[in-house]
Amino acid sequence: MKRRVPVSISEVKEILAKVDTEYMDQIQRWTYDYASKFAKLDPSDAQEMKSKLINDCKLTDEEAIELINIMPKTLSELRSFTFGWKKLILAETLEKILKIISK
């Protein structure tokens, strides 16, 4: 059984960039086009940020990836995403998250 690993949009772009577009199906081309337009970080920076968010802020893989893909800039933007996670995140942790994301 294959293990599923959540990846950021930046990582999706990197993965699909290795495939010649001539050999992509329509969904892959759409996905690559989307990732090319909306990737906000270098893939290695996204992986490093994910690691820091998981280790320093105790986020899950999925939560870290969501924040990396969106890159909220303010505390209120960040709260709008974390509110949907249905868990309490202390203000101190939210500030730490913003500091990691803003680097």
Image: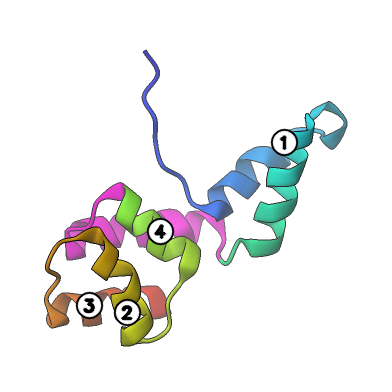
Q: CA distance from mark 1 to mark 4?
A: 21 Å
Disc 3 or 4, which lies upstream in sequence?
A: 4
Tell me, yes or no, if residue 6 can be seen here. Answer: yes
**In this picture, is 64 found above or below 19?**
below
Q: Helix, strand or loop at disc 4?
A: helix
Disc 2 or 1, which lies upstream in sequence?
A: 1
- Residue type pointed to by label 4: Glu
Q: CA distance from mark 4 to mark 2?
A: 13 Å
Q: Which residues are magenta?
A: 41-61
At which x and y percent is residue 49? 37, 62
In the picture provided, is 72 more to the left or to the right than 36? left
Q: Which residue is mark 3?
A: 94
By secondary structure, the bulk of the magenta-drawn segment is best described as helix
Residue at 55% x, 48% y is: 11
Residue at 49% x, 52% y is: 8
Q: Residues within 10 Å of mark 1 (few under 14, many from 20)?
A: few
How many marks on residues? 4
In the picture provided, is 74 more to the left or to the right than 34? left
- What number is the disc on residue 27? 1
